[in-house]
């Protein structure tokens, strides 16, 4: 009957409707709904007979680890990681509400915060496992773990960092990790073998407070502005290298001002006839693993915040720069890394093409698994897609791209395709 048919329609889910369900859970900071997201993922994983383990490295920040046991548990296992949390969204600046996961039927675009970063991969992992089980009756040789971690967007310290330092993590005996990457505007998939490292740098200036009418050397705001000028010039030079094609976007040091703070506040503004005695500015600085952090530190001390001009600075390092053996956090993408050719073959077996491996301009939880010495690639299978992470109207372009990505993940899990286990890692 018509009634019966309607019931069926509302209970039938597809990869796209499951993706939408996950996107509708508001896991944006500052109050991410981790528990609803984890319940949803767990309900999905039960259908796939995956075992689930819940960690609480911080009481309000659960971390879910799913496991698909392999037939040979003595082999190093594989981890497929994604984070549950998202950056905030400003609904008034969106075309459709950021947690509606509305699918525009004419374009296939799905609107949601987290669509690209990175709930897509979180569910593509599960969809790939679902297809491998239901259509191929596939059973992995290596154990496969899938992690859903909190806290990535605010540094990962209570999420992935705590996890990699746990006894349980050591027990996983991981050989290889896939984590998030970034969309590709072209027809090739992008893969990332390193992240840039972030420093949050506060530059402070002190100066003599003087009457607003007085021209003199060494006022605090003037001191700060001189530093801002020097840093802006460095920033422009770095950007020029990129524009001239002499360096990749992630090879240069980015220096971006994120706040300026000065002045003596009044209830409705600032005192206008006093030159204040303090001023500060905050910068997001990122540099590749090939940049010498000591040289950069020296540049900040000598040129950007020189004590001779009454300047000081504070660097907050947001994570490790070296692995446990003192090596830069880079995963080899050549024959020295036995996982690399298998990964590449897997993407190709799914009909995809990889562009030249890159360093990610931003930073992910991959730095923590690389720190442990585990080869880790950043890979979000999105091609022909505008890069919209952290932007208004973060859309997944489009549903067909999402479905194709599932196939790529499937091949990655299977370890290179070739129609079976042979030649792959599983
Ligand atoms: C500074 S560590 C926070 C990591 C964050 N990750 C995604 O955007 C980033 O800012 O790159
Ligand atoms: Zn992310
Ligand atoms: Zn992000």
Image (cartoon, rainbow, N blue to C red):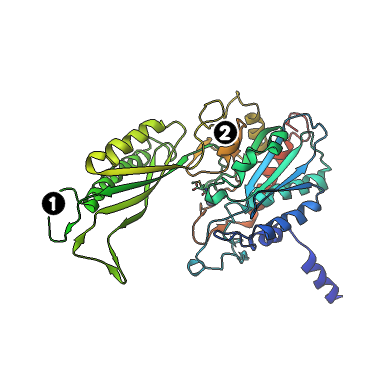
Along the line of sight, the residue nearer the viewer: 271 or 353: 271
Q: Are marks 2 and 1 in contact (CB under 8 Å)?
A: no
Residue 343 appears in the figure: yes
Q: CA distance from mark 2 to mark 1?
A: 50 Å
Q: Position of residue 379 (x, y in %)?
A: 60, 42
The image shows residue 30, relative to residue 284, as above or below, that is below
- Name the image quarter holding residue 37: bottom right
- The first of marks 2 and 1 along the sequence is 1
Q: Position of residue 289 (x, y in %)?
A: 47, 33
Quick one: label 2, few (<14), some, or many (20+) residues within 10 Å?
many
The quarter of the rendered structure image containing the C terminus is top right
- Marks 2, 1: nearer the viewer: 1
* Residue 159 relative to residue 214: left or right: right
> Measuring 56% from the left and 68% from the top, which residue is drawn there?
97
Along the line of sight, the residue nearer the viewer: 419 or 148: 148
* Residue 288 relative to residue 178: left or right: left
Residue bearing mark 2: 371
The image shows residue 148, relative to residue 238, as above or below, that is below
> Measuring 67% from the left and 42% from the top, which residue is drawn there?
80
Q: Is mark 1 within 8 Å of ligand 1?
A: no
Furthest residue toward right = 1
- Name the image quarter holding residue 313: top left
The image shows residue 274, relative to residue 421, as above or below, that is below
Along the line of sight, the residue nearer the viewer: 194 or 229: 229
The quarter of the rendered structure image containing the N terminus is bottom right
Question: Which disc is residue 216 wearing?
Answer: 1
Q: Position of residue 393 (x, y in %)?
A: 52, 62
């Amino acid at each position: 009957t018509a009634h019966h048919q309607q019931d069926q329609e509302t209970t039938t889910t597809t990869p796209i409707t499951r993706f939408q369900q996950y996107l509708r859970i508001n896991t944006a900071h500052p109050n991410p709904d981790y528990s609803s997201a984890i319940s949803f993922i767990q309900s999905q994983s039960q259908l796939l007979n995956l075992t689930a383990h819940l960690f609480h490295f911080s009481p309000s920040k659960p971390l879910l680890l799913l496991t698909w046991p392999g037939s040979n548990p003595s082999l190093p296992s594989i981890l497929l990681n994604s984070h549950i949390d998202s950056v905030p969204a400003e609904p008034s600046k969106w075309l459709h509400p950021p947690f509606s996961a509305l699918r525009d039927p004419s374009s296939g675009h799905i609107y949601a915060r987290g669509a690209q970063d990175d709930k897509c991969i979180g569910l593509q992992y599960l969809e790939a496992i679902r297809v491998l089980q239901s259509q191929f009756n596939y059973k992995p040789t290596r154990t496969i773990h899938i992690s859903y971690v909190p806290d990535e967007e605010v540094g990962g310290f209570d999420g992935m960092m705590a996890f990699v330092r746990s006894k349980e993590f050591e027990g996983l005996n991981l050989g290889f990790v896939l984590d998030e990457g970034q969309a590709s505007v072209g027809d090739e998939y992008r893969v990332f073998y390193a992240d840039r490292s972030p420093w949050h740098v506060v530059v402070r200036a002190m100066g003599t407070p003087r009457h607003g009418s007085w021209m003199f050397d060494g006022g605090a705001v003037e001191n700060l502005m001189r530093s801002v000028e020097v840093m802006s010039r460095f920033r422009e030079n770095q950007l020029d290298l990129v524009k001239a094609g002499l360096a990749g976007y992630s090879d240069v040091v980015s220096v971006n001002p994120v706040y300026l703070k000065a002045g003596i506040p009044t209830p409705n503004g600032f005192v206008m006839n006093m030159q204040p005695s303090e001023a500060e500015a905050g910068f997001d600085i990122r540099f590749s693993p090939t940049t010498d952090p000591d040289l950069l530190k020296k540049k900040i001390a000598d040129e950007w915040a020189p004590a001779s001009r009454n300047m000081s600075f504070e660097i907050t390092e947001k994570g490790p720069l070296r692995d446990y053996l003192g090596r830069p956090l880079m995963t080899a993408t050549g024959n020295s890394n036995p996982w690399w050719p298998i990964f590449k073959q897997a993407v190709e077996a799914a009909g995809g093409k990889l562009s030249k491996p890159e360093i990610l301009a931003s930073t992910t939880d991959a730095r923590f698994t690389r720190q442990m010495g585990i080869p880790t690639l950043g890979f979000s299978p999105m091609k022909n897609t505008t890069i919209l992470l952290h932007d208004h109207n973060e859309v997944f372009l489009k549903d067909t791209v999402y479905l194709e990505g599932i196939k790529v993940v499937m091949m990655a899990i299977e370890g290179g395709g070739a129609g079976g286990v042979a030649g792959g890692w599983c």
